[in-house]
Image: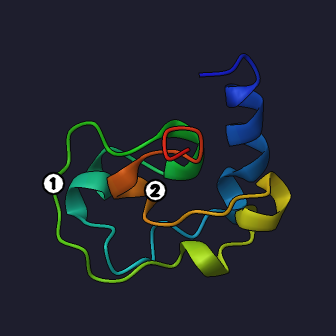
Amino acid sequence: MPDNTNKIIAENRAKCICEPCPTYNECMRAGDELLFCVTGKSPTCTFDKKGCLCPTCPVKPVLKLKKAYYCIRGSEQEQK
């Protein structure tokens, strides 16, 4: 991860809408996992695709994101 990852997480965590996403589950909630667009896919949780809120996330324009389903597919960098 880039050196500024922690700064990006701190600045955008409150804007993140991962938690209300239909695909977000109890495993992710228990691990307090958010901002998959920055941190990458969940390393320990398995889940079913139930819909994706990434296209409407307020973090998307801030970080100039173009992808979706980060929790499954990985961060923006991983999906390139």
Kind of residue sitting beneath label 2: Tyr
Q: Quadrant of residue 47?
A: bottom left
Left-right relation of 58 to 28: right
Query: Which x, y percent locates residue 54?
Result: 56, 72
36 or 6: which is nearer to us? Answer: 36
Query: Which label number is shown at residue 70?
Result: 2
15 in relation to 53, above or below:
above
SS label for mark 2: helix
40 in relation to 2, above or below:
below
Kind of residue sitting beneath label 1: Thr
Alpha carbon separation for disc pair 2 and 1: 13 Å
Name the residue carrying label 1: 46
Query: Which x, y percent locates residue 7?
Result: 77, 31
Q: Quadrant of residue 59?
A: bottom right
Query: Which x, y percent locates residue 71?
Result: 38, 55
- Find the residue positioned furthest to the top: 3
19 or 78: which is nearer to us? Answer: 78
- Residue at 61 percent across and 77 percent down: it is 55
How many numbered markers are drawn? 2
Q: Quadrant of residue 72?
A: bottom left
50 in relation to 80, above or below:
below
Left-right relation of 49 to 74: left
- Check the image and tell me how it is coloured: rainbow
